[in-house]
Image: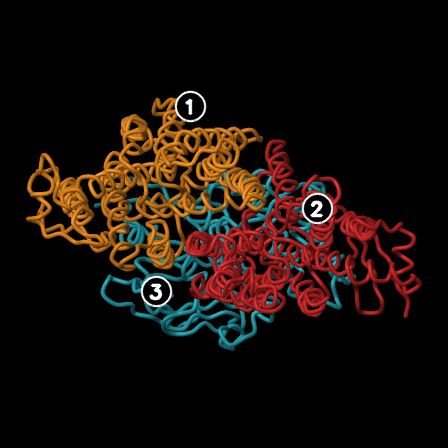
Chain colours: A red, B orange, C cyan
Amino acid sequence: MSATLERPVSGLRGRTAVRIGPASVVLRWRQLLVSLIALVLLVVVSALSIGRGDYPVAIPDVLRTLVGLGDGPQNFIVLQLRAPRVVVGLLVGLALGVAGALFQTFARNPLASPDTLGITVGASVGAVAAIVLTGGSSVGALLGGFGIPLAALSGALVTGLLLFLLAWRAGVDGYRLVLVGIALWSAGSALVDWLLTNAQVYDAAAAYVWITGSLNARTWDQAVPLAIALAVLVPLSLAAGRSLDVLQFGDDTARGLGLRLPAAQTAVVLLAVALTAAAVSAAGPITFVALVVPQVAVRLTGGSRPPLLASGLLGAVLVVGADLVTRTALPEALPVGILTAVIGAPYLLWLLVRGRRRFT
Amino acid sequence: MTTTADAPARSGAAPRARRGSPRARRLLVLLVLLGLVAAAALASIAIGTRSLAPGEVWRALTDRHPTDEAAVIVQQLRVPRTVLGLLVGAALGMSGALMQGHTRNPLGDPGLLGVTAGASLAVVLAIAYFDVTSVSGYVWFAFAGALAGTVLVYAIGSAGRGGATPITLALAGAALSALLYALVRAIVVSDTQTLDSFRFWQVGALAGRGSEVAWQVAPFIAVGVVLALANAPALNLLGLGEDVARGLGQRIWLARAVGLAAITLLCGAATAACGPIAFVGLVVPHVVRALTGPDHRWLVPCSALLGAALLLSADVLGRVLARPGELQVGIVLALIGAPFFIALVRRRKTMAL
Amino acid sequence: MTTISSGTGVRHDRAPDPGAGPGRVRLAAEQVRLAYDEHVVVHDVDLELTDGSFTAIVGPNGCGKSTLLRALGRLLRPAGGQVLLDGRAIARTPTREVARVLGLLPQSPIAPEGLTVADLVARGRHPHQSWVRQWSRDDESVVAEALAWTDMAGLADRPVDALSGGQRQRAWISMALAQGTDLLLLDEPTTYLDLAHQIDVLELVGRLHAERGRTVAVVLHDLNLAARYAQRLVAMKDGVLVASGTPAQVLTEELLADVFELEARIVPDPVTGTPMVVPVRRLR
C-alpha cells in the first residue's frame, strides 16, 4: 500500500493528489499555506493577548503555564482570567468565519452573512428582551451568566429557522434567501430599537453593550459549551465542502452533477445558522467577521469560493487580534465588536476600490 | 387603515377610447391613492389619546382662537404631526422608487445607501459633543450626515473597475453602514447620557417633533420632489439598460446625478426629521409597481402618495394599539412591513425588476 | 413513420423511428405533462431516445421544448406521466446514479467567479467521486482527455468567464464529456453564438455522438443546423409533439406551415444533402 503523489493536469496546478490504494485525497497547497500561516498568527496573537493586561506575563511564561508548568499567580491570571476570554474570542471568530463562508457560497453573493440575513439581530432581540424585561443590569449579573446567552441562542435559532422556512419554496433560492433575510433584519432591528426605548436607561446601556459584541468577563462557562458545539459543527461544515463545490453552480448544473439539492441546501443553511447562534450567544453579535473574512480568504487562496477552514482561522485571528488591540492600544477599552467593524470595513472598501474581483 | 395591496385597480373603467385601460387604470389608482391619503390624514387628526368626531375636527380646524382643548390638540399637535407624516412618508416613498429604479435592485432601500447610517452618526456626534438636545437641532446634523454617507457610498461603489453596479453599490452601502454604526456604538456605549437621548431618535417616530421640524425640512423635500419627478422619464430609459438608454440619447451621468441628489434630499430630510424609518422606501414601490406598472412617471408620484398614506396609517395604528401610550411609527412599519415584504417575495418564483 | 397533428388530436404511431439508432430505449417520456404553477406547458407527450441516437427537438418559441428537455433531465417533476431512464422511473432513481448516466447542459449555465477551465471540467467528475475518492487516476485521465478532445487543453488555465462565448460552450461540453455519461442533453447550446461557433459546437457534439457513441438530444432553434447534424428530428407546437422522424420526413412544407407558420421551400443542402429550409414569407 504505497502513497503516490501525482502532478495533476495543467490548469489544476497548485494541488496534489495523494493516493493510497483506491482512496485519494486532494491537497490544495495555497489553501494549506494560508491556513497554516493563519494558525501560526493565531497562536502568536493569542499568546500575546493572554500575556497583556494589568499584570503582564511574558510569552514564554504564558506557554509554560498553558502546559501546566506555571506558578500560582500565573496560573490564576492565565488560566482563569485571560485564557477563557481569548479562547471564546478564538472560537467565536472560527464559527463566524465558517458561517460566513457557508452563507456566501450558498447564496452566491458576497453580501450574504448572518448579519445581513437577520440572524444576529434575532439573537439581539432575544438578549435585549431578556435584559430589558428582567432588569438586566441589576439582576442581570446573576442571570447574565446563564439567562442572556440562552435568550440570545434562542433568538438566533428561531430567526434562523424562520429565515429558512420563509425562504423555502421547493428548495431555497439564494436570492430569495437574501431578500427574506433583509426583511427579517429590518424587523429585528426595529424590535431592538423599540425595546431599547422601553427600558430603564441603565438597562438600555447594558443591552447596548451586549449588542455591540464583547469579550468582557467571558469565562470558561461560555468557552466550554461553545467549544463543544464547534467540535460538532465545524467538522460537519467541512464535510459539506464537497457539496459546496457543486452548489456554487446554478441549481440546474448542481442537480445535473448528482447533488441532492434540497438536502444539501438544508444542511448548509442549518449549519451556518447553528454556528452563528453558538457564536452570538457566547459573545454577542461581533459584526463584520462573517462578512469580510471569507472575502479576504478567497482572495488570498485563489479559487472560486471562500475556503472553509482558512475562513475560520482568519476569523479567529481577526477577533482575537481586535480584542488585543482594544485592550492595549486604545485609551478606553471598547467592545471588540466595534473594532472588528473598524478594521474590517475599510479593508472591504479598499478591496472594492481596487476592483480586483468582479462581483456578480 | 392600512392601505397596501387591498387597493387593486379595478378595470371596471372599461376601455373607452384608443387610450384604453392602462391609462384609465393608472388614473384610477392615482385617485384611489389620493383618497387614501386624505382618509389617513383625517384619521391622523381625529384619532389619538382623545379621539374626536369629524364635526369636532372641523370646528377645531377652523377655530381662529383656539381655547377649547380639542382645538388646541388639533392645531398644535395633530396637524403638525400629520403634515410631517405626509411630508416624510411621501419623501420616503419617492426616494425608494428612485433608488430601486437607479440600482435596478429590488432591495433598493435608501437606508442601504448609507443615508441612515450617516445621519445616525451625525446625530450621535451632535448629542455627544455639541450638546444638542432638541430634535430641531439634530435636523441639520442628520441632514449633513445623510448627504456625506450617500456621497461616500456612491464614490466607493463607483471607484472599482466596472463602475457603479447594483451589487457594488449595495456592498459599499453595507460596508460603510456597518462602519458608521460601529462608530455610533463606540460613542454611545461609553456615554449613557448620549444613549438616553439617542435611543429615542433612533427608533423613528413622528411624535415629539414640533412644527418647526416640518418647516425645516419642507424646502428640501420640495426640491427633492421636483428633482424626482424630473428624473422619472430618464429612469424609464435607464431601466432598459445603460447601453440602450445611451443609444436613445439619454445622458447617463446627468440622470444619475439628478437621481442621487433627489434621493439624498428626500431621504436625508426624512431621516433628519423623524429618525431612521425602514420599509417605506423598500415596500411602497413594489406595491405601486404592481398597480401601475413600471412606468416611472406614474410610479414615482404614486409612491409618494402611498408612502404618505402608509406612514400616517402606521402612526395612527401605533396610537390605537398601545393606548394610552403609543407605539412609534418605525416599529409599527417594521412589524407590518416585514411580513408583507416576505409574502411579496414568496409569491414570485424569482425576484426580478 | 411520421405523424402530423392536425391540431385537434395526436395520432400516435408506435412504430420505431427509422431515423433512430438501433436497440434499446435509454430515456423515455411517457404521457408526460408539465406545468408551471397552474399553466400547463407540455401536454401528455411520449418520446423515446434510443441508444446511440442523435435527436434534435425543434419548435417555435414557447412550444415547450426546453421544458420537455428539463423534465427528461430530471430537473422538473412531471405533473402527469413519468420519465424512464433505462426502464426505471427517473424520479425514484437517486440523483447521483442518474448523474453518472445522464448529463445535462442547461441554457446559459452559470460558472462561479474565478473558476478555471480545468476546474470546471474537473467538476464533471463529481458524481464519480466521494470523500475517500477525491481524485483517482481515472479522474485525472478522463479530465486530461476531455480537455484534449475538445481542444481546450491550451486554455485550461484560463478563467471561464474570460473566454468567448464559443470557447465557454466548449468548456461546458468538455465538462459534460468528463462526466462520462452515456446520455447527454443540451438545452439550446448554440443560442447567442455566431455561426462559426454554432457549427463548432455542433460539430463537437456530432463527434461525441459518432466517435464516442453517446446518445444525444439537443434543443435547437435553427432548423437547418438541426437537419444537418441530427439523425432524428422531433417537432413540437404548443406543448404537443407533432412530428417525429428523420429530417427529411419531418421538414416538409406542410409542417413548416402548420407548426412554424412559415411558407418555405425545402431544398437539399448543397454541402450535406440534408433538407434545407429556405423561407419565403410568414403565414398568418
Residue at (28, 36) in percent of width and height: B296
**Chain letter for mark 3:** C
Residue at image mark 3? C35
Kind of residue at disc 2: Ala
Subunit of mark 1?
B
Comparing marks 2 and 1, which lies closer to the viewer? Answer: 2
Q: Which residue lies furthest to the front in this view?
A: B67
Label 1 and label 3: CA atoms lie apart by 44 Å
Residue visible at 17% across and 42% down?
Answer: B72
Q: Quadrant of the N terminus of chain A?
A: bottom right
Front in this rendered view, residue B351 or B286:
B286
Q: What residue type is labelled 1?
A: Trp
Circle 1 SS class: helix
Q: Residues within 10 Å of mark 3 (few under 14, many from 20)?
A: some
Q: Look at the picture and state if B328 lies above or below B109.
A: below
**Image label count:** 3
